[in-house]
Amino acid sequence: MIKYLRFAFTPLLLLPVISLAQTDLSVATLSAEKIHSSTIKEIVKSLSRKHYNKIKIDDALSSSLLDSYISSLDPSRSYFYQSDIKEFEALRYRLDDEINNRKVTSGYTIYNRLQQRIMERVGYAINRLESAKKFDFTLNESFETNREKSPWVTTATQMDDLWRKRLKSSVLNLTLDDETNTDAKAKLIKRYNNQIKRVKQTNSEDVFQIYVNNLTRLYDPHTAYFSPRSSENFKINMSLSLQGIGAVLQTEDEFTKIVRLIPSGPADKTGKLKANDKIVGVGQGKQGEIVDIIGWRLDDVVQKIRGKKGTVVRLELVGSGSKSLERRVISITRDKVKLEEQAAQKKVITTRVEGKEYKIGVIDIPTFYIDFAAAQRGDRDYKSTTRDVAILIEELKQERIDGLIIDLRNNGGGALQEANSLTGLFLRTGPTVQIKFSNGQVAPYEDNNPYKAYDGPLAVIVNRQSASASEIFAGAIQDHRRGVIIGNQTFGKGTVQTLTPLKHGQLKLTHAKFYRISGESTQNKGVVPDIALPALLDAKEYGESALEHALPWDRVSAVQGFSQFNRSVLFDQMQQLNLSRTQRLGDFDYMKEKISHRANLRDNTVISLNRIKYKDNLENEEQWLLDAENKRRQAANLPAVKSLVELEEILEKDKLGRPIAPENKAILTESVRILIDYKKLQPTKS
């Protein structure tokens, strides 16, 4: 139903007059262009016809869109006032009518208000930094770093106080890194002047994309609109896996966050970056100035990070688990990810259990790859996951292994056909996965190749970063009862995306969903391991279920011939043996303590603005990590280390030169023991 509402936005809240020499805080009023009318129509048409999730453009969507849009524009609730939010309420059930009438007017109205509020706040910040006033770091004040659920600010006085503390926190953090108070202020003034420049550079196309992407995210988190300019930047982002640092990035609040690392890429090889780390500065070369990029647009950050192969980029990072905001700088040499470095690799682990020696083969698969170009050319020896693993299995069989582990930790997926054919190496024939399309049709994928490369004891290790094709493989092995799944609940990405070209840009939308042969979806829930080990990533923070508007878990009919089964008594026995071992191992105590410690840090989002207390928190955090590590080392009869720097230097490295974290090594070691239990407890074949 169309609502004929008449309302006018009230004048802006009267704020203290800000006098800034040589700083123009005016900003142009933005409005939709003619092309946007036909583009929003085309987008809505594509969503309604092709998207898996059938959502109506109605009042319910309008209400959700308003909340989502406001939250995306001001996630820290540091710009809009309560009065602004009250005015925007008049739009709550109007946005759907506008969209259905090929209009996006209100999206611009709200964004223009944001631009004005940003200029007010930046003006206040620069004015305060330029003034002679000093910040008093002896006061027992604190600052809330997570304001997502805080009430909206009601008065200019309250907003000024919030920003006073925000500035104080920034100056305190910078001056701990041997910068003077003057240097810190100059750096922040430069940051805010850059923000003014970026606000002034914002154009109508930018606003349209931001607004439309808040609409597409209501369908699911993997659906997105790319304007003509960002379509090219989307290709650039993807090429980061080919030339650059090899990382997938996204914007979170004012930060650029690392979503995941491309296996064997330049960033991954350092061993010093991890998912959820935030990039706050970028420097060129070994000596170039590190430019503060807080608040930058993602495409501008990408342009700053990319560069020619062989050149160095330095990243200033804030860790994901620390409330202290302590920074570190790492250097990365830009390069292409070489296909041979992403290829599956093998090794043999020999261990003695109850007087008997066991040889366990381990095949590490970083991604599900295939050289499509070579395959299409008809090359007989083109590289693919399945081909490489088949060769490695034959080599391991020659070494007379007693069991095989497929390590899919941190494998974010890849080619579906490779997940299907790889599963076939461990089965005679049979279905591996089902795909349900937006029209309701369900189609099974099957392995029709009777060749079985290995029929001995099999284990698959997964973690929270195992996604998509990894989940298809692990789920099929579990459903066929072909092996034991070890580790953590997987990511839960069970959806399929396709790129749809538009007359103005392109649309990436979710058009299908994966289902296991049991009928259960891998979406949202992922694959739950048979034997669970400590999870180093919190499922509440990372994974599909942590994403807003993620499609739900559900099920379809099982494939014909599949019989549902209860958890095997064998697995219960194996879990008990696992628990009895890990309760005595220092490595697992260390993991559990680290997980608990990270959770405490995450929940405590208030930081002290008292310099002594702030420094004490930093030192206490470093000491906790050092003590926990030395406790682990003592249990393993290893000498203590004097610092975390010393620890980093002595850590064992893998074939690519990456430090092997003790917890990752412990998980592999225990997985070997679990597979041996699996072999020993199997009924003897007559």
Image (tube, rainbow, N blue to C red):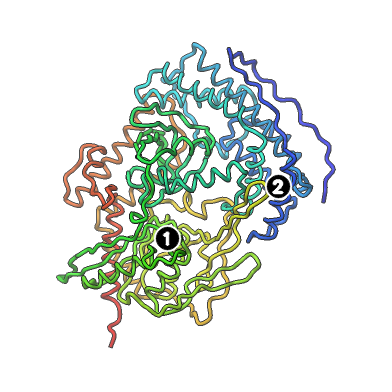
In this rendered view, identify the residue nearer to me: 349 or 324.
349
Q: In the image, residue 507 lies at what x, y percent?
A: 62, 51
- Name which residue lies at 36% across and 66% down: 381
The CA span between labels 2 and 1 is 36 Å
User: Hey, what amino acid is under mark 1?
Assistant: Asp
The reply to whether residue 601 is visible in this rendering is no
In front: label 2 or label 1: 1
Residue 538, relative to residue 255: is it above or below?
below
Q: In the image, residue 88 lies at what x, y percent?
A: 72, 37
Residue situated furthest left in the rendering: 355
In this rendered view, identify the residue nearer to me: 458 or 512.
512
Residue 118 badge: none
Residue 371 badge: 1
Residue 39 badge: 2
Residue 449, relative to residue 389: is it above or below?
below
Residue 125, relative to residue 347: is it above or below?
above
- Name which residue lies at 52% across and 61% down: 494
Residue 437, relative to residue 238: is it above or below?
below
Horizontal arrangement in the rendering, residue 572 relative to residue 14 (left or right): left
Q: Quadrant of the C terminus?
A: bottom left
Q: Mark 2: which secondary structure?
A: helix
- Name which residue lies at 61% across and 61% down: 511
User: Hey, what amino acid is under mark 2?
Assistant: Thr
Q: Quadrant of residue 162?
A: top right
Horizontal arrangement in the rendering, residue 134 relative to residue 553 (left or right): left
In this rendered view, identify the residue nearer to me: 66 or 577.
66
- Within 10 Å of the Cα at label 1, are there few (<14), some (14-19), or many (20+) other Cα atoms? some
Asked if disc 2 and disc 1 are in contact, CB closer than 8 Å, the reply is no
Q: In the image, residue 574 lies at what x, y percent?
A: 32, 70
Q: In the image, residue 681 lies at what x, y percent?
A: 28, 76
